[in-house]
Image (tube, rainbow, N blue to C red):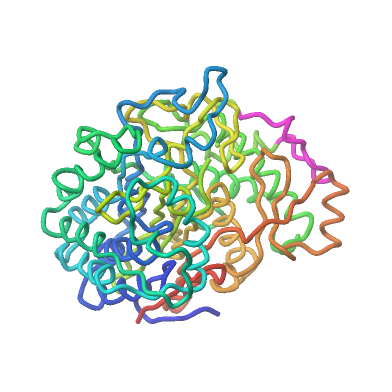
Amino acid sequence: MGMVTDSAMVVSAHPLATAVGVSILQKGGNAVDAAVAVHWALAVVAPWAGNVGGGGLMVVRSANGTVHTLDFREIAPAAAWQDMFLDGEGRPVGRLSLLGHRAVGVPGSVAGLFAAHDSLGELPMSLLIQPAIDLAEHGFSLTALEAKELNSKLANIRAASTRPSIYTSRSFWEAGDSLRSPELARTLARIRDEGAAGFYHGLTAELIVAEMQRGGGLITLKDLAGYRPIWRSPIVGTYRDLEVITMAPPSSGGIVLIQALKALEGMNVRSTGWQKAATIHRMVEAERRAFADRAELLGDPDFVPIPAERLVSAAYMAQRMADFDATKATPSVQVHAGDPLAESEHTTHFSIVDEDGNAVSCTTTLNGSYGSGVVVGEAGFVLNNEMDDFTIATNTPNRFGLVGSAANAIAPGKRMLSSMAPTVVTRGGELFMVLGSPGGATIPTSVLQTLVNVVDHGMSAKQAVSAPRFHHQWKPDTIRVEQNAITPDDSLTLVRMGHSFKVRAPIGRVDAILVLPDGRLEAGSDPRGDDAAAGY
């Protein structure tokens, strides 16, 4: 079993950020205050994904049952155009959508944090951002994992940035090295003193635009001044006796998650067994169909009509699974979208429950690890490479092998499709679970497995997030598996059914909170990262 606390819990990707969240709860802040403070802290201590130069999605469920979902996803600059990453022959140009200034979408995080705080927070913002300012000012020690990640991205940062930064101040980082960022501390202090305007206007905005001009990027002062986060309606589905509350488009994660759950509902997963061939076969076939829908139908709902309610309905999924064969795999070439893909593994998620029972599930990202590699000169923060989450060219896979359609084509002011799936689960109107994960395309499947592990296989939160995972995303037509996720016998059975396998690096880093029958909270912090839980 994971750590258990009586009344409040924070689970995030970094022990220092978790500690900041708990301290805010202890000062009388609510779950949203803690979430805002954790996000600011992650921008300092987890710079590979925590950010002020990226965006994210937040699901808030108040203790009284009211749900709010906030989309602070980045948007394409006004000067963006559909074929901006293609050459004259219509082929993608090098790493243009991944590395450097063209890859950057207009950042949404700062506006998102102010929107959440202004509507739902209680403590002053200056109190919530100060711990992050202190961490940037005084520095913190890199973990072994963080040093390794930073070293692996140094070449990108050097290639993409036009000015030196704290990250490139060494040629090699080691565990225990202190990362101090006075430039980032000053950027955060401007936000503390001037509010969101301290980022989208004034000196910080000018520094961002100067960086864009030096590197041939597209973002202007007007783009920054015009950014707005959007409160959206959640996607809500049921699984057995649970209500699953998650993020609507422009995230695909919630729809993919609920579609897969609906497809599993007709099977007694507990009796077919955990990680057994029959169970995996059904889950893979569900994922295959959900990701086919994602590729064809999903995009920014402000630009394309999305039949969201229909997509997550039991009737629709029954129709999608009508050709399911319990004895053999359906080749992906035979699976098309139903009638009514795209991003980095280096996202970060945190889950929070406060003592009043308010819950926040928040996923935030720069897309790739250290985003575009562009550190804003004299401002100390990394910019996203979120433009790669658009369909660069129809039916050309992005770096995660996800393909997409015109629904997710680049257009000025449009939000790019995401797989993020911050999720809150209730049972009988009471909070049951708060969870989410990083991992690009593997996000909804990681959340799916964690939930099924708890609900159908009776695991504790810790067992559920630690259990080995697998993933299928329609194309390429292979089951990606973690080492030793499936026994040789079950693997052989699945191969005979027509499935193929590819072993890959760890999948996702789920941060979950489970409400135990006695009302106490159990943390599931993923051993795949530096993730840490704390509470009281």
Query: Is residue 368 at least partly visible in the picture?
Result: yes
Asked if residue 332 is among those painted magenta in the image, a careful observer would answer yes
Image-based side of 333 in relation to 327, left or right: left
In the picture, the quarter occupied by the C terminus is bottom left
Asked if residue 22 is among those painted magenta in the image, a careful observer would answer no
Residue closer to the observer: 426 or 9: 9
User: Which residue is rendered at x = 41% and y = 67% of the image?
Assistant: 12
User: Which residue is rendered at x = 26% and y = 67% of the image?
Assistant: 132
Query: Is residue 228 at least partly visible in the picture?
Result: no
Q: Position of residue 16 (x, y in %)?
A: 36, 74
Q: Position of residue 56 (x, y in %)?
A: 37, 49
Quarter where residue 18 is shown:
bottom left
Is 126 drawn above or below residue 210 in the view shown?
below
Residue closer to the observer: 228 or 166: 166
Considering every residue shown, the one lying at the far left of the view is 193
Image-based side of 121 in relation to 398, left or right: left
Is 165 drawn above or below residue 497 in the view shown?
below
In the picture, the quarter occupied by the N terminus is bottom right
* SS assignment for the magenta stretch, majority: loop
Residue closer to the observer: 245 or 239: 245
Considering every residue shown, the one lying at the far top of the view is 88
Q: Position of residue 373 (x, y in %)?
A: 42, 49
- Residue range in magenta is 322-338
Is 475 drawn above or below residue 129 in the view shown?
above
Q: Position of residue 188 (x, y in %)?
A: 21, 59
Residue closer to the observer: 134 or 320: 134
Image-based side of 284 in relation to 77, left or right: right
The mark tally for this picture is: 0
Image-based side of 260 in relation to 143, left or right: right
